[in-house]
Amino acid sequence: MLEVNGLSVAYGAIEAVKDVSFTVAEGQVVCLVGANGAGKSTTLRTVSGLLRPRRGEILFRGRPIHHLPAHKVLATGIAHCPEGRKLFATMTVEENLLLGAYLRRDHDIARDAAHVYELFPVLGQRRHQKAGLFSGGEQQMLAIGRAMMARPSLLMFDEPTMGLSPIMIQRIMDTIGVLRDQGTTILMVEQNALAALALSDHGYVIDLGRTTLSGPGRQLLADPRVREAYLG
Amino acid sequence: MATLAQQIVNGLVLGALIGLIALGYTMVYGIIKLINFAHGEVFMVGAFGAHFTSAYLLPDAMPWYAALPVLCVAAVAVSVTVAVLMERLAYRPLRDAHSLAPLITALGVSILLQEVVRVFYPGATAPLPFPRVFVDSQLTAGSLIVQWTGVLAVAVSPLLAAALHWYVERSRLGRAMRAVAEDPDTARLMGIDLNRVILATFVLGAVLAGLGAVLYGIHYGQIDTTMGFQNGIFAFTAAVLGGIGSIRGAMLGAFCIGMVKSLAGQYAWGGAQYDYVWVFVLLILVLMFRPQGFLGRLERVRA
Ligand SMILES: Nc1ncnc2c1ncn2[C@@H]1O[C@H](COP(=O)(O)OP(=O)(O)OP(=O)(O)O)[C@@H](O)[C@H]1O
Ligand SMILES: [Mg+2]
């Protein structure tokens, strides 16, 4: 479904991503793990069209998308739930969800919002409150809900469990599992490699801007090199 | 007493007109943090667009209620065209540049537009009379004179501001504008086309400036190429005073400035020749105690 080949991305003279390649098959959960500054977020930001690659290609359903602006990438069916949640803090829960559905012109938007409220009742109860007032876990729920509102076929999560309590981490991971079961393909970046790889069909290790290892999630979990580097 | 009432009326009218320009400053700043110094000229070219239509396109014997809407459309069309060209040709290429570059460009565009109109518009080297396309009578109470054009301006301007506020709060495009103002990258992840939303912001500001230009023309009865620069400075000051980025603030700031300028021109040291000094004194005083302006938010550092 998504194929990234020999990707290289630079911020000015700094080449943050040097040579990243991976594929995501339809219906899978795929995880990119790697240390701080490895280039994981940069990779996702390039897939979603916020950054332009210097080299390499990104194919979605066989079509190149690396030249598309971000709004066109979303229109092809790729949504991106960014690192640090990035909610619109001065807007209400409801407005955040409506922005998630910005490109949609159908009449099911209200129904999908109701579905998000069902999944996360706390959001429904506080739908008219400003997003900036919510706790970290609640904000992450809203960020996930907002990304779901675009009805993507591929949903990318950048560190969805960052700074959350163990219970909340489990809850978020369960939700991602539910999304997968409902047919959404997932590409995820996680520092919390243990929880993420356990859920993943396939994983890639990114080290200093290059994909170095890959394999089924459970196999990577067992790999001594991964255990040593990321699981302590 | 009558003089005081007269100056209050004059101040209200001036505030209403400045407010329509201030809304454009505040909207554009709110969304791309650019002080578009050429916005005063968007107002000025609107006035000349209406003047041109009246002088060269409309038949002479047209009743005012037929001519006024036509002139409004003409002014808005010219203002919007100039604002769109300005955004596409001058500001968009500098979108990612250091903020000083767009600011200096804005000053350049401002001077360019003034000079182009002055040199190429027939007779624009001197002030031109604006067509009287509204009831040309006035209300009088003793020595107090209230022109109907002033009543129109004071009635219409806050209504337009309220409509704009409602639109920004309630519509899909308004929501997109607020999203871009808050976090452009995340707005892009929502599928918002930044270029279109920014252009739409310039267009909205230009619509209000064009309407303001017609109201200005019929009230003061003449227009000139520096009207945008002079009123633009006050409008920009109004936007800062009210809290730049805030729609209600811009209107509030404009009425304060209209009032101060009008009253200071009558009563303060220096008279009408130095009335603008008091406007800036007010600005400095307010910013000393409330740097974000009346209704502005302090810029917070985002995590
Ligand atoms: N806007 C930027 N300008 C310059 N350099 C940047 C920018 N964003 C990231 N970098 C650099 O690019 C490299 C990769 O950053 P990136 O955010 O992709 O890493 P990451 O794998 O997501 O790390 P983390 O786990 O800490 O989120 C880092 O060295 C970082 O300092
Ligand atoms: Mg990151």
Image: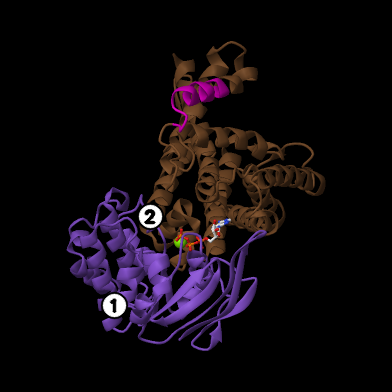
Chain colours: A purple, B brown
Which badge, 2 or 1, comes first in the chain's sequence? 2
The kind of secondary structure the magenta stretch mainly shows is: helix
Q: Nearer the viewer, mark 2 or mark 1?
A: 1
Asked which quadrant contains residue A29, the reply is bottom left
Check if residue B121 falls in the magenta segment: no
| Viewer-side residue, A70 vs A91 | A70
Residue position marked by numbered label 2 in the rendering:
A88
Separation of disc 2 and disc 1 at Cα? 23 Å
Evaluate whether residue A190 shows in this view. no
Q: Which mark is residue A179?
A: 1
Question: Which portion, as a residue range, is magenta?
Answer: B279-293
In the depicted view, which residue is nearer to us: B189 or B56?
Answer: B189
Q: Amino acid at mark 2?
A: Phe
Chain containing mark 2: A
Q: Secondary structure at mark 1?
A: helix
User: Residue at coordinates 55% horizontally, 43% vertically from top-left?
Assistant: B25
Identify the chain of the residue marked 1, using the numbered disc in the image: A
